[in-house]
Every structure is written in structure tokens, then in C-alpha cells.
Amino acid sequence: MRMIRTGKFADKKILLIDKNQKTTNDRTWCFWEKENGFFEETVYRKWDTISFFGEDISLSMPITPYRYKMIRGIDFYNYCFTEIGKHKNIEVVYTEIGKWWREKNNTIIILDNLQFSLGWPVVFNSVYEPQIDKHTTIKLLQHFKGWMIETDKPVFNTVEATMMDFRVHQNYGTTFTYVLPVSDKTALVEYTLFSKKLLQLEQYDSELKNYIKTILQIDNYTIKEEEFGIIPMTNEKFSFAGKAWNIGAAGGQTKASSGYTFQFIQKQSRDIVECLINGKSLKYVPETPARFRFYDNTLLDVLYNNTFPGKGLFTRLFKKNKPQQVLKFLDNESTWAEELKIISSLPVWPFLKAALKQL
């Protein structure tokens, strides 16, 4: 989409391979921005205020100049593929890749057991493949199930999105919900965990039902849509350069400590296209600054080993810092001074031990 919008790639042949077509609303992306973003036309709802519920605390926090935004998967797919379909130099193929390799000045790819020769193209890969575990490897899963529910009477505050609600038990690991109201009768309610193992499918349903009844105090509602997802949270070091140029989660754009991915993909895509336009090697595409990887891996170590409960950790983060500073930190855009303040609000001993291990 970024290549298309520049107007500078109309003379290039582009092949896009995906496993299958996207025809359902299978996921939701949430993120925050100060201005209108690249995909602003697809934003379904946005909020100027977020709420946080933690250990004996509830916060309603204006986040100006940021706005918390929500994009529905189906809107994103329809928007992108409608635009892609207008460009005859782009071919879209839905299949699984058997394998591919390069020899001399040719690239060979196997699709549906047929072999194709592609010359020597620039190849981007977004298929995440876990690396071989080392004794220092940490792997958590962020897994979630969400329901878009509709009530028979107005119950939701449409001007405020619940970013984290820890008023749920923590028996399975760091667990919270978030609530995104799209009208006074309709909201996405998402049950989210950071843990080493997945739950049984019926457990997610049971926890959602319990949260809606006991916390939201809603008895009558209809489930309009469902979504389920898994995001790897790991201290593995992903490389952009490899057999192909690795992008998205495969290229390390998932933030290890929180699972946020969407905005980091936007930044990387912007940098890639700038390099292509200016004739610069893609080796100049910037990597995540080392200090932010260190912060993420330290926090991930604390969550993985449960040396300090995630519920208490995020409570401290939002209780002792302005929300704008927390969001800026989570975006990897904070300064050293701002990071020092954030770090000083967290428990010293568990983080010091985790930091020493990462070093």
C-alpha cells in the first residue's frame, strides 16, 4: 500500500502470495497516534480517553495529543485489496509456498507443486518461524479471545476505551480484559493473557461470560462476532536481513513485552519504501534501538518468571506516570530522561535481577 501510494512503482511487477483470502472480520488492531495515520480511512472508532483498572485503583485518563484507535480486520482487508486490484502490475496468488531458493541469477519457487522461475526479485517474508531455543530463550504467548456484544439497552460509555482491566483472577498468569465501545449498546470485550500455555477454548468463553456478568454487570446481550489470536512474546533476536528481507513479526516488529505490532510494522514499511525510492540498500533500514530491546527483554523476564506480578507491574506503570509518557515509552519514542522516570516507578529488585540476566 505504501509502494502504491508513492506512485513510483507502477513500472515494477509485484507478486503478493498469501495463504488464503481474507473475507471475515477475524481480528482487531488497536494502537495510538497523535495525527492521522497512513490507514486513517480504515479507523473504525477512536477515543481521547482511556481507562485502567488495577490493584485497588481505577483511572480515567485523557491522552491528548494521542488518540486510541481501532481498526477492524475486514475493513482493512477490503480497503487494501480494493486498491491493490486497481493496479495491473500487481498479481495476488492465494496458496501455500512449498519452498523457494536462489541459484545464480534466478529465484525458484514451488507453488501448488509447480515450479516457477522469477529472475532475481527483491523478496520480503512475513512468515514467522520460531528459532531454535537456547538456554536464555524466553517464550511467552499473548493469547486472547474477544466478543463483539450487543445489549438491549444503553450500557457503554462511548467516549472512553478500557485499555486494561485487571479485575479478573490471575490464576493463569498476567490476565486482563479490554473493552472498546463502538456505541452505547455495542462493544468489543477481549479477554487477554500473557502465559506459557494456551487455555482450552471453553475456558476463554467461561471467563468472558463471567467478566461481562460480574464486572460489567450485563445480563442480556447477543454475541455478534468472535475473534481469537495468539502473538508470540520472546527475547529471540530477529534479523531483518536473511534469505529474504523479514518484515512484520518475522522481522522482529512485535514488541516483546506487550505484543504491540501494528504501529511498528507501519514504521518499518515506511523506512523500507524510502530506501527503495532513494536507491539505498535495505541494510540501511533502522533496527529497533538496542536499549528498547533490553527494556523489553527485562520486562519479559519478570513476567515469564513471575518475579513480580504483571497486575502490580502495570498498575505501578500507569499510577506513577502520565499516560502519555507510558504510551510514548511503549512506542519506543521516549528519551533517556523519560525512560529513567518510567524505570524508577517499577520495583527495583525484580527488575535489577532480570536486567543483569539480560546483560
Image (tube, grey):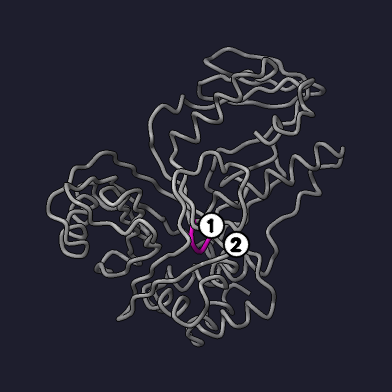
Q: Nearer the viewer, residue 265 or 35?
A: 35
**Mark pair 2, 1: CA separation:** 9 Å
Residue at image point 55% right, 53% down? 254
Other-residue count near label 2 (Cα within 10 Å), few / some / many at <14 / 14–19 / ≥20: some
Q: Is residue 338 magenta?
A: no
**Image quadrant where residue 104 sits:** top right
The label on residue 123 is: none
Relative to 203, is 323 on the left or the right?
right
The residue most toward the left is 219
Relative to 119, is 318 on the left or the right?
left
Tell me the kind of residue under disc 2: Asp
Other-residue count near label 1 (Cα within 10 Å), few / some / many at <14 / 14–19 / ≥20: many
Tell me the kind of residue under disc 1: Trp
Q: Nearer the viewer, residue 277 or 305?
A: 277
Relative to 276, is 221 on the left or the right?
left
Q: Secondary structure at mark 1?
A: strand
* Residue bearing the label numbered 1: 32
Bounds of the magenta span?
255-259
Residue at image point 71% right, 55% down? 287
Q: Where's the N terminus, which quadrant? A: top right
Query: Mark 2–mark 1 contact, CB under 8 Å?
Result: yes
On the image, the x and y values in percent for residue 311 come to 36, 73
* Residue bearing the label numbered 2: 331
Residue at image point 63% right, 52% down? 238
On the image, the x and y values in percent for residue 137 come to 52, 61
Q: Where's the C terminus, which quadrant? A: bottom right
Relative to 326, is 266 on the left or the right?
right
